[in-house]
Image: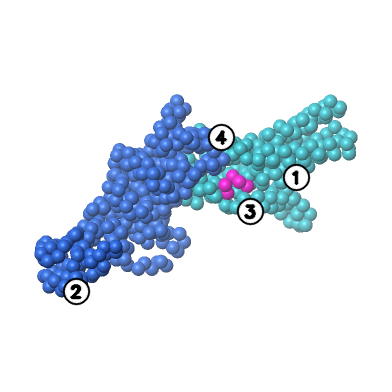
Amino acid sequence: MIALDRVCKRYGARTVIHDLSFSVERGEIVGFLGPNGAGKTTTLRMLAGFTTATSGRVRVAGHDMATENVQAARKIGYVPEHPPLYDALDVSAYLRFVAKVKGVPRSEMAAELERVTAACRLEAVFRREIYKLSKGYRQRVGLAQALLGRPEVLLLDEPTIGLDPGQIQETREVIRAFGEEHTVLLSTHILPEATLICRRVAIIHHGRLLAIDTPGGLQRAVEHSNVVNLQVSAPAEALRAELLALEGVRAVHLQAARGEDRRLLVQCEVEERDGVEAAIARTVALRWELHRLERQQPTLENVFLHYVRAAPAVAEAA
Amino acid sequence: MSNAFAIYQKELWHYFRSPIAYFVVAVFLLGAGYFFSYNIFFTGIASMAETFQNMGILLLMVVPALTMRLYPAEYGAGTMELLLTLPLRPWQIVLGKYLGALTILLLMIAGTLIDLVPLYLFGDPDTTTILAGYIGFLLLGMACLAVGQFFSALTSNQIVAALATLAVLLAFWFVGHLQAFQTSHVLRGLLGYLSFSGHYADFILGLVRSEAVVFYLIVTAIAWTLTTSYLQWQR
């Protein structure tokens, strides 16, 4: 559905996108993850046909965006970072305008408006002028606009930014429902969002693709976590000595648990091998009271930082 | 075509939902009415010639006000990103917006028709001359709107768009005056040909010359093409 093949984008001497290639299949929700200025918006703009690639091929829904962007536009719903709204129009007039341009037939107009209005929960503001709407509603009108005409591909630039938790939940539901049959590419810098709704996550930094995989796959690839956390009620020095004596434990960090008398938070750096946790558990439980023991889960934050830090420093002037 | 029509409808909505259309039309009619009564009482001749001349200059002043927001408003609100990613070709955007502005111009023209009532009641004006004058005014207006639209597309600032349009329109209006300083025949001919007011003067006298008609249409077409190409090139 979406395919980028060795795409570069230059503005003057500044290269914003370097040799970017990836593809998204039908029925897939892919998250585009990167710090601000990584090139997420530029990539989405190229996919939406707002800008053209300097080199390389961008294909969406079977159309080359360099030459057939108008044909492709019928199959794309696009929500830019700032929803592109006409403040003077009311919601119904705005949606009708977009629907007309997208070629929704007059006979289906009312049903189509009703469908997107219901999907984005805009019934309450349907007749209200857009300049009177709250940020959350504006964002949803932007999304409703993109859903008009039943596009095959949905491109969303930070779709949940500026929404309250309830609205974020609703927006995610809309995206998830759409993504069951169609293709969604959304950019975000909120990591949990990507893990929640995306089948795959692409990490982009300085205009280069660093990784693309399932959230779980990315986590596994980056680190087999080598930290075990415990909570123990024990004298500090005795515990430290006991733990360091164990085979496989490299270092121990102790910290008093706040609000809990005599309870210690322990962070053990361990070697990567099976059975280390079990050995720690046995040793500690034998002498003291063990409240908790867990291997630290790698978060997407760690994954992201790992890739971003590992990326070579980019010569911007290149 | 229906896409261009959707843009046209949206443009009209914007004109009439904001004070711009009312204000511009009112100012124009106020000015045209003033010049009409002044000319009639001053000369006592049942003719629109002087009034058409004044209306031409007035037009140069109001066209920038009509065209200045065409694109800067879209750039500012981020809606250009919407228009260029919808199934729209740049020429459809240009056409829809142009027709919107042209509709306001037609309203202004319709408003001046009221001047003809006393003219025909109390005098015996020459109908064909007046008709020619209106054709000339419409063509002049079409060319000015197209130029205004082009400069509006170039900038995201409405004031800059308005002032650039005004400067260029004034230059085209007065460029004929430079003829007197030229010794070269070619240059004199060229400056005369480029003069908006020169061609307009023929219409006021009752002459619909194909050369003048073609001139205004060419200016309109060039400005359209430049606007469309600019939008295309921006991608």
Chain assigned cyan: B
- The answer for how far apart the CA atoms under marks 1 and 4 are is 29 Å
Amino acid type at mark 1? Ile
Q: Position of residue B67 (x, y in %)?
A: 63, 45
Q: Earlier in the sequence, mark 1 or mark 3?
A: 1
Q: What's the magenta bit mostly, secondary-structure-wise?
A: loop
Label 1: chain? Answer: B
Q: Earlier in the sequence, mark 3 or mark 4?
A: 4
Q: Which residue in the structure is indicated by mark 2? A: A237
Say if labels 1 and 3 share a chain: yes
Label 3: chain? Answer: B
- The answer for how far apart the CA atoms under marks 3 and 4 are is 26 Å
- Place residue B102 in its image quadrant: top right
Q: Nearer the viewer, mark 2 or mark 3?
A: 2
| Residue B78, magenta (yes or no) | no
- Place residue A266 in its image quadrant: bottom left
Q: What is the residue that sits farthest to the front in this orientation?
A: A261
Residue at 58% from the left image edge and 36% from the top image edge: B13
- The answer for how far apart the CA atoms under marks 4 and 2 are is 80 Å
> Is residue B191 visible to us here?
no
Q: Nearer the viewer, mark 4 or mark 2?
A: 2
Label 2: chain? Answer: A
Residue extent of the magenta highlight? B68-73
Amino acid type at mark 4? Gln
